[in-house]
Amino acid sequence: MNDWITPNWPAPLNVQALFTTRSGGISSGPYTNFNLGDHVGDKKHIVNQNRANLLKALPNEPKWLSQVHGSTPIWVDNNTNLLRGDAALSKTRNIVCAILTADCLPVFLCDEAGTVVGIVHAGWRGLAAGVIEQAVAEMRKSCIHIMAYLGPAIGPDYFEIGEEVRHSFIKQDKISIPAFTPCKGINSKKWRADLFLLARQRLAAAGVTKIYSHEECTYSNPDKFFSYRRDGDTGRMAGLIWLTK
């Protein structure tokens, strides 16, 4: 579709990546139009048709995860089990790693030699639990030089969290302090969190220095993106990455 996002990063030519938007599907109501989530209340046959349309842009059916806002990376190559985790990794040609988001941050990963790819579902829980560090560490068992691309997510002007969330990050590392700004007015006891900055900090701590970003806000662009924080009942977008050879 015309407004689907292709990461603008210097990945090897055999690394392909894609992030979908609301465009291109047949869902209606709060799921209009291209909902890919089969767990959000949309009709199953509609989601299946949307996924069939997505497949036209891919070499194979994506390896969908059962996401739990945790820190477990999954090698999806030849894996036929229930894939419970929040990062999908692959070393195999035409195996499509996939995550679903609607405000959480999709973190695309690959190595500079084009031998390993991955994608991370990074909400605040996963970030705090170390999902990025775990995924990078797992990839480093097969490669050395890793780069990252941060896709669209809820922006720092809209992502409100409580003091306990802020404290959980700062307790781990005080470098995260600049990622939080106090809310004003009736929400003065809450904070706004910058998922993009938190992810950059976590990547840097894991030794990933080549970080590229789209940093488009899902919350503030309702025509283009689903947003759980904005709408509650809503669809899901997909982040996808794979190797072509």
Image (tube, rainbow, N blue to C red):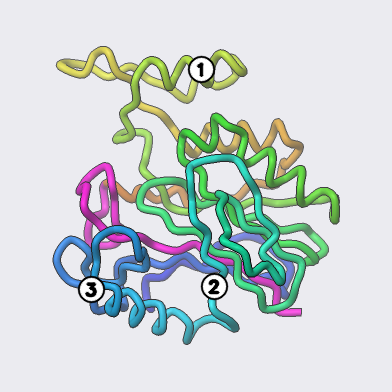
Residue 170 point in image, percent of width and height: 54, 16
Q: Residue at x 76, y 37 (%)?
A: 207
As for residue 20 lying within the magenta part, the answer is no
Structural distance between the alpha carbons of marks 3 and 1: 40 Å
Q: What residue is disc 1 on?
A: 177
Left or right of 62 on screen, residue 228: left
Q: Earlier in the sequence, mark 2 or mark 3?
A: 3
Quadrant location of the N terminus? bottom left
Q: Residues within 10 Å of mark 3 (few under 14, many from 20)?
A: many
Q: What residue is disc 3 on?
A: 27
Residue 222 point in image, percent of width and height: 23, 56
**What is the magenta range?**
220-245
As for residue 242 lying within the magenta part, the answer is yes
Left or right of 51 on screen, residue 13: right
Residue 214 point in image, percent of width and height: 48, 53
Circle nearer the viewer, 1 or 2: 2
Q: Amino acid at mark 2?
A: Pro
Left or right of 242 on screen, residue 4: left
Q: Nearer the viewer, residue 49 or 150?
A: 49
Numbered mark located on residue 165 in the image: none
Q: What residue is disc 2 on?
A: 62
Structural distance between the alpha carbons of marks 2 and 3: 20 Å
Q: Is residue 243 above or below residue 145?
A: below
The local secondary structure at tag 3 comes to loop
Q: Residue at x 58, y 81 (%)?
A: 60
Residue 44 point in image, percent of width and height: 29, 73
Q: Residue at x 27, y 13 (%)?
A: 189
Q: Amino acid at mark 3?
A: Ser
The local secondary structure at tag 1 comes to helix
The local secondary structure at tag 2 comes to loop
Q: Residues within 10 Å of mark 2 (few under 14, many from 20)?
A: many
